[in-house]
């Protein structure tokens, strides 16, 4: 009995460690129609190699994005058109930051860091759903971790190998 239990426990422990190794997003919930400060936690490099670039694709409906600069990293804001125009505090807004790239840094495989940006969760986003922020970590020697998998309807992020981090959209708390 013990011989059967030990491998099962080892698998459970390894499985839980894998889940903790994903790029995370804090806070995990936010109301639509409000400003959201997204804190992306990058827990490691790529299979022993340091992370040198972190790319975040900005999801549709998250507008007026302002990334936080990081000492030792170069910040790039890729701009483009939104799929539609949004009302941003009375101003029609049809374009903005669609990707944020921090590059030139050196996050060791045995180190953790956070990458921060803020923006506005537009009121038309679907309450109760998850808004995903696909992230790509580029590491030394061309290695990469692509946290870009978005679950299909009815599927859990826990079922994916490389899930994109996301925020659950809550009802507006009224006002901005």
Image: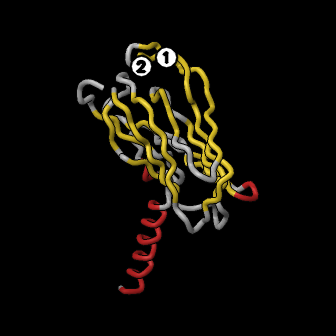
CA gap between label 1 and label 2 equals: 6 Å
> In the figure, residue 109 lies in which quadrant?
bottom right
The quarter of the image holding the C terminus is: top left
Q: Position of residue 142 (x, y in %)?
A: 74, 54
* Residue drawn at (42%, 36%) of the image: 131
Question: Residue pushed farthest right?
Answer: 141
Q: Which residue corresponds to mark 2? A: 88
Decide which of 83, 34 is in the foreground and name it: 34
Which residue sits at x=43%, y=53%? 158
User: Where does residue 149 sit, x and y in percent of width and height?
Assistant: 53, 44
Q: Quadrant of residue 46?
A: bottom right
Return the x and y of residue 24 as percentages of the image width and height.
Answer: 45, 52
Q: Residue at x 64, y 57 (%)?
A: 51
Q: Residue furthest left?
A: 174
Circle 2: element type: strand
Q: Position of residue 29 (x, y in %)?
A: 33, 42
Q: Is 115 situated above or below 125?
A: below
Q: Is residue 151 left or right of residue 44?
A: left
Q: Is residue 67 above or below residue 162?
A: above
Q: Earlier in the sequence, mark 1 or mark 2?
A: 2
Relative to residue 95, is residue 45 depicted above or below? below
Left or right relative to 126: residue 174: left
Residue labelled with disc 1: 93
């Amino acid at each position: 009995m013990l011989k059967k239990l030990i491998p099962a426990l080892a698998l459970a422990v390894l499985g839980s460690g894998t889940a903790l190794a994903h790029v995370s997003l804090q806070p995990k919930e936010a109301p639509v129609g409000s400003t959201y400060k997204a804190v992306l936690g990058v827990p490691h490099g790529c299979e022993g190699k340091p992370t040198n670039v972190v790319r975040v694709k900005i999801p549709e409906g998250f507008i007026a994005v302002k990334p936080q600069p990081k000492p030792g990293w170069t910040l790039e804001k890729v701009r483009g058109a939104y799929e539609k125009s949004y009302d941003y505090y009375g101003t029609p807004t049809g374009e903005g930051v669609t990707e944020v790239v921090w590059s030139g840094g050196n996050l060791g495989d045995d180190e953790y860091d956070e990458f921060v940006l803020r923006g506005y969760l537009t009121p038309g986003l679907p309450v109760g759903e998850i808004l995903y922020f696909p992230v790509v970590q580029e590491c030394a020697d061309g290695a990469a971790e692509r946290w870009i998998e978005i679950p299909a309807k009815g599927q859990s992020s826990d079922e994916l190998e490389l899930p994109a981090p996301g925020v659950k959209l809550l009802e507006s708390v009224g006002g901005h």
